[in-house]
Amino acid sequence: MVTKLNLPTSITDEKLRDLYKEMWLIRYFDEKVDQFFAKGLIHGTTHLCVGQEASAAGSIAVLEPRDKIVSTHRGHGHCISKEGDVNKMMAELFGRETGYCKGKGGSMHIADVEKGNLGANGIVGGGIPLAVGAALTSKMRNEDYVVLCFFGDGASNEGSFHESVNLAAIWDLPVVFICENNQYGMSGPVKDMTRVEHIADRAKAYGIPGEIVDGCDMIDIMNSVDNAVRRAREGGGPTLIEMKTYRWKGHSKSDAKKYRTREEENEWRAKDGIKRFKEALIASGVLTEDEAKALQKEANQEIEEAVRFAEASPEPSIDTLEEDVYA
């Protein structure tokens, strides 16, 4: 029996197949980064989004090319979903000249302005006012683009969050605030950091819609974000969407995850967004099991090629070390 998927009209069967491969690109990219960091070949810290693939892929899937995103310190998935070049991304993490920032920015500073990715940010909550500024630009210049603003649960306690959401609300700016609630701000559980049960409830204080979404369910994510984007584009103002998700890895590569249990991790792994999306696509007749395996293999091959590209790329010349760097 074929199950019909309830999807935004812009999402075709071809797009769904691309999204399935994209989710594997995100996972394989971060798993490869994990391996090479452990070997000492990637320097600086990294924040991996393994387990959060649906949040990035599903949200960005409903955007138009002119729309923008603002990312976080855990931003590899956002960059890939906004048509980022995995070769340039991997080269950047390897500190090579062919990277997005010529090897000088690392994991938390990747941006691709031409594709509408206004950048990751190493400051918790630092991207939120930037997203509001971009949305204000869109409105003042009548450029008709919408901004997706990603941030974590910890950022919702920063002053930048409250000031920015308030400003976006009173000016009806075309921005969608997406809180990727992965249950922990560094080593602290959300329940110990925030008194409200749901971060989305904070939308009431600013007079805007707040919605809670299963952050591992691609279908729910696409429908929720699509509605918010259309509302913003039509002049209805911002929406706050809280995506309940989970990072499988530690906060960063220096995190041993001693603050959570194996049982909790297994419970969330059972909700794997990639697995659930595959099951939905097969049940709807969009994919067969063999086609799913082929797309997964293609994604793996692209990431392996990105590694080869990065390893073969030159390191920045000592003569250019001070170029493009603020001091």
Image (cartoon, helix red, strand yellow):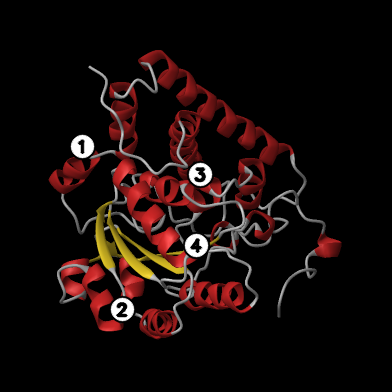
Q: To which residue does mark 4 refer?
A: 71
Which image quadrant for residue 119? bottom right
From what the image shows, is residue 175 above or below residue 44? below
The answer to the question of whether label 4 and label 3 lie on touching residues, with beta carbons closer than 8 A, is no
Among the two numbered marks 3 and 1 on one chain, the one whose residue lies closer to the N terminus:
3
For image coordinates 66% across by 53% down, the residue present is 95
Picture disc at residue 270: 1
Among the two numbered marks 2 and 1 on one chain, the one whose residue lies closer to the N terminus:
2
Q: Position of residue 11 (x, y in %)?
A: 45, 39
Picture disc at residue 228: none
Callout 4 secondary element: loop
Return the residue found at the far right. Answer: 319
Q: Residues within 10 Å of mark 3 (few under 14, many from 20)?
A: many
Front residue of 50/84: it is: 84
The answer to the question of whether label 2 and label 4 lie on touching residues, with beta carbons closer than 8 A, is no
From what the image shows, is residue 148 above or below residue 246? below
Which image quadrant for residue 325? bottom right
Q: Is residue 192 left or right of residue 40?
A: left
Q: Position of residue 15 (x, y in %)?
A: 49, 34
User: Mark 2 and mark 3: span between their CA atoms?
Assistant: 29 Å
Front residue of 209/78: it is: 209
Q: Position of residue 246 (x, y in %)?
A: 28, 51
Q: To which residue does mark 3 refer?
A: 33
Among the two numbered marks 4 and 1 on one chain, the one whose residue lies closer to the N terminus:
4
User: Mark 4 and mark 3: span between their CA atoms?
Assistant: 18 Å
For image coordinates 83% across by 63% down, the residue present is 320
Q: To which residue does mark 2 refer?
A: 157
Q: Is residue 277 left or right of residue 87?
A: left
User: Mark 2 and mark 1: span between their CA atoms?
Assistant: 29 Å
User: Mark 4 and mark 1: span between their CA atoms?
Assistant: 26 Å
Question: Which amino acid, mark 2?
Answer: Asn
Q: Nearer the viewer, mark 3 or mark 1?
A: 1
